[in-house]
Amino acid sequence: MEKYVYDFAEGNKDMKDLLGGKGANLAEMTNLGLPVPAGFTITSQACQRYLAQGTHVDGLDEEIDRHLAALEEAMGRKLGDPADPLLVSVRSGAKFSMPGMMETVLNVGLNDESVAGLSRQAGDNDRFAWDSYRRLIQMFGKTVCDVPGDEFEDALHKAKVAKGVKDDVQLDADDLRALVSAYKKVFAKHVGHDFPQDPRHQLDLAIEAVFRSWNADRAVLYRRQERIPADLGTAVNVVAMVFGNLGPDSGTGVAFTRDPATGESGIYGDYLQNAQGEDVVAGIRNTLPLADLEKIDKKSYDELLGIMATLEGHYHDLCDIEFTIERGKLWMLQTRVGKRTAAAAFTIAAQLVDEGMIDLDEAVTRVSGAQLAQLMFPRFDLSADPSPLTRGVGASPGAAFGEVVLTSADAVARAGAGKNVILVRRETNPDDLPGMIAAQGILTSRGGKTSHAAVVARGMGKTCVCGADGIEVGRDRFTVGGQVVHEGDMISVDGTTGRVYLGEVPVRPSEVVQYFEGDLDPALANEPLVSAVHLLMTHADEKAKLKVRTNADTGVDAARARRFGAHGIGLCRTEHMFLGDRRELVERLILARTETERNDALSALQPLQRADFLDIFREMNGLPVTVRLIDPPLHEFLPSLEELAVQVAVAKERGEDSPRGERMLAAVRRMHEQNPMLGLRGVRLGLVIPGLFGMQVRAIAEAAVALAAEGGHPRPEIMVPLVGAVQELETVRAEAEKIIAEVVGDSGVEVLIGTMIEVPRAALTAGQIAEAAEFFSFGTNDLTQMAWGFSRDDVEGAFFWRYLELGIFGISPFESIDRDGVGRLVRIAADEGRAARPGLKLGVCGEHGGDPESVHFFHEVGLDYVSCSPFRVPVARLEAGRAAIESTGSDHR
Ligand code: ADP
Ligand code: MG
Ligand code: MG
C-alpha cells in the first residue's frame, strides 16, 4: 500500500516531489537537530488522488490517525482536549514555492471549551486564548468555507473603533471574546451552520481545503505564469502550534541569510512582537527590522543567527526562514533556498565561490539567462537630480514608470489599452495577481521585503517598491504629505533604491550592458555585480559546447553582437537591403518585361548589396557570416492590392493616364497569394526569377574578395532558404559555384554553401540534402509553423490562449522549442545529415536560439551553434555553459 503520511523525522530535503518544499525542509531541519515543532506531512500524491477522485482517499484517514496519535504522545497533549489542548497548524506546501497562493489554517483544535484550557496552559492568559480562537474562526472560515474575508476584517475594525484603539494588540480578552461571537455569527450566516466544534473534524476539513486550494484560480494563474506543471498537487503539513502571540516576550518573524535584493551578507528580516506568523507577511502592523531583536531578546537572537549560519553551511545557498519565539524559546517554522533578485543571484553565486562553499560549475548553474536578461534592462538616469516624492523599500529592482492605477482590475484594463501602469496598493494579496502581471511596477504603502507584493514581484522580475508608509492610498488617488497624486498621473518607481518620483524619469543603460559593451565606467569595474557577471560568464564560455552566433543585418548590429561575445553571424537577412530607396529597383525588377530590363535592375542592385556585405564582413572579420539569400515573397515589396486599386481607379476617374500604375496593379494581382508563407518565396523565387540569386552570390563573393584584398579574413557562408528537396539546392548550387569560382579566382577566399532546414520535408530527407550542403541551419520559426500547420501571425492572437489554458502546450511553441514534434524533426535532420556528411556544420537561427530552454535542447542534440539577436547573445552564452555543465551530471559541491 502507498504511504501517504510521513513524520518529519522520516523525510529529507530531497523529497520535495512527495513532501513539497516546506515539508521536505521541515524534515531536513528536524534531522539537523534544529528546534522544529513536531509534526507530519501528508504527501502531494494524496492530494493528487483527492483531486482526481473529488472525495476522500482510502486509507488516508487511518494513517492520519496513527500519526496524530504519535504527535499527541510526543507533545503530551490531545488535539483540542478541553483541559489541556494540543493545537496544530495545517499548512500547504508544494514542490515549487507558490508564495501566498495556497492556504494555511492556524490554531486548529480550538473550540468553545478548549479555549479555556488554552488560557490555563498559558497561565490564565485569556486574552491570548481568545485571540487564537478568533484567528482560527477567521482563517478557517475564509479558507475552508469560503466566507468573504472582508466580513471578518470589518468586524475586527468595528471592535477597534468601538474601543477607540488602532492596533489589534490593544484589544483585551473581553473585546476578543465578543469578537469571537461576532465572527461566529458571520460564519453561520455564510455557511449555514455553526462553526464546527469537533477538533478532529476541523482537522479533516482543513486538510481537504488545503488540497483544494491547489486548484484555486489564483494558484492556477500563478502556475501558468511561472510555468509550474498543473498536476503536481500540494502536500499538507500538520504542525504542533507554537505561539508568538503570548505577549511582548513572544513574536514572529522572517529572515534571510543574505540580502535577497543585492546579495550582500548581513542581517535581513522583519520581526513582529506579540503576533502570529501570518501578521508579518500580511503587513497588518509595521514590522521591526530583525536587528532590533537583539535588544528585545538577545538569547533568541544569537540562537537564530547561529541557526542561519548552520543552514547556509548546509544548503550552500541563501536561505529564507520563518521563525516564532514563544516566551523566549525560539522555534523554526520554515526554511527554503530563498528567492532573490537577478543581481543577488549573480553576486551570491560569486560570493559562495569566494567563500569556498561551491565551485564555479555549481555557481554557473545558480544563475539563469532569464536573470541575466533582467540585468540588461535600463535603469533611471538621475543626473537631472529629480527629487523623490517619497521612498519605501526597494523590493525588486528595475526602473518602471507608468500611470497610477489603484486596483488590479484597472491595471488590467489600462494595460490592455496599451498604457504603462504602476499598481499602487496599501498591500497586495493574491487576488491582485492579474493586476501585478499587467503592471510595469508595483508600489505599496505597507509591508517589508518579505511582503506578498515583494515576494511575488521578485519572482516575476517586476519592479517593486513596498512599505512606502509616507503615502495614504485612497480610492482614486493617493496622497504624500499634502500632495495628491490622482489615478492616471504618471509616476516612476525605482525598485533598487525604493525611491518614487512624480512624472517620468529618463532611464539609462545597465552597467551589465556597459560591461558587455566594453565601455564600463572604470569606477564600476570592481562593483560586486559586474565582477560576478564577469566571473560566471567567463566560466560559462569555457564550459560551453555550443557556440553562439547572432542574427544581424547591418554592420552596426554585427559590431555590437561581437562585443557581446558572438562567434559570428548565423543569420544575415538580405531582405531589408531591398527596402527604402531601393524599393524602386525591386519594382523595376518585378515589372521587367525583357531580359535587358531585368538585368538592368539587377546590375543596379548588385553594387549596393556588395557594399552591405563588405560592411558586415569587416565587422565580423575572421568569424563566419551566414548570409541568407532573399527569402520573402516579392510582392511584400510592392504596394498593397487595395491601395493600388484605389489609386488606379481614382486616376481613371480624373481622366489621368497611369500606365505604370496599371502595370503594377496587374503584377500585384498576378502575384497575389492565398497563403504567402507557403507560396512563391525562398529558393522558389531564386529558381523562378533568373539572375536574382546569382546577383546576390556575386555580391557576397566580391565583398569577400574585397576584404581579403584589404588583408582581412572573410568567412562567408551562403544559405539557401526554404529548401524541401535536394534538387532545388543542387540547381542553385550549380549556378552559385560557377559565379564563385569566377569571382574568387586565386584570392584564397572560401565560400561555403548550405541550406536552411525549415520545411518538414527537408528534415525528413536531410540525408539527401546533406550531399549538396556544407551546413544546415534550422529555421525553427518556419519549421514550427509548418510542422504544426500554424500560421504564426494569425494563431497567436486567435486561439493560443485557449491552448495554453487547456494545457495542450505549456508555452507557445514559437517561444520555446516543441521538443517532441519540431524537436524530433531537428534530431532526425541532425543525425541523418551528419551520417551522410560527417562534419556537417549544424546551427539554429530561429528565435529559439535565444530561449534558455531551447538552448539546452540544442545542446543535447549536439548542434554546433545557436544564433540569436545581439541582445540575447550573452543570455545564450550563459545558457550554453549551463547546459554543458548540467549535462555532465556530476555533483558539483
Ligand atoms: P505560507 O506558505 O503562506 O508562508 P505557512 O504554512 O508557512 O504559509 O504559514 C503561515 C504562517 O503561519 C507563517 O508565518 C508560519 O510561520 C506560521 N505558522 C505555521 N505553522 C505554525 C505553527 N505550527 N506554529 C506557529 N506558527 C505557525
Ligand atoms: Mg511560510
Ligand atoms: Mg524561414
Image (spheres, rainbow, N blue to C red):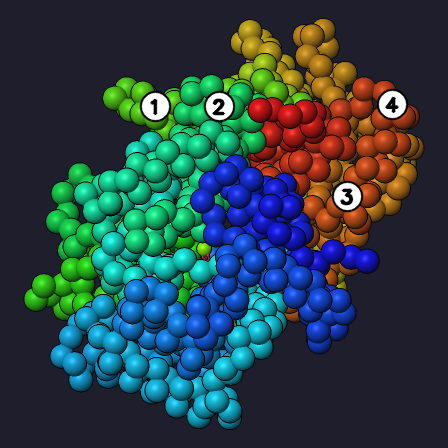
Q: Earlier in the sequence, mark 3 or mark 1?
A: 1
Residue identified by numbered label 2: 357
Q: CA distance from mark 4 to mark 1?
A: 43 Å
**Looking at numbered disc 3 in the image, what kind of residue is underneath it?**
Gly
Q: CA distance from mark 4 to mark 2?
A: 46 Å
**Looking at numbered disc 1 in the image, what kind of residue is underneath it?**
Asp
Of the two numbered discs 3 and 1 in the rendering, the one whose residue sits closer to the viewer: 3
Count neighbours of disc 3 (C-alpha within 10 A) and say few if under 14, some if 14 to 19, many if 20 or more: some
SS assignment at label 1: loop
Using the image, tell me which numbered label, if any, was put on residue 519.
1
- Quadrant for the C terminus, please: top right
Of the two numbered discs 1 and 2 in the rendering, the one whose residue sits closer to the viewer: 2
Q: CA distance from mark 3 to mark 4?
A: 21 Å
Residue identified by numbered label 4: 837
Q: Earlier in the sequence, mark 4 or mark 1?
A: 1
Q: Are marks 3 and 1 in contact (CB under 8 Å)?
A: no
Judge from the rendering whether residue 575 lies leftward or rightward of residue 122; answer left or right.
right
User: Could you tell me residue 371's position as x and y percent?
Assistant: 47, 39
SS assignment at label 4: loop
User: Could you tell me residue 865's position as x and y percent?
Assistant: 67, 28
Judge from the rendering whether residue 331 lies leftward or rightward of residue 26; answer left or right.
left
Q: Earlier in the sequence, mark 3 or mark 4?
A: 3
Residue identified by numbered label 3: 823
Of the two numbered discs 2 and 3 in the rendering, the one whose residue sits closer to the viewer: 2
Of the two numbered discs 3 and 4 in the rendering, the one whose residue sits closer to the viewer: 3
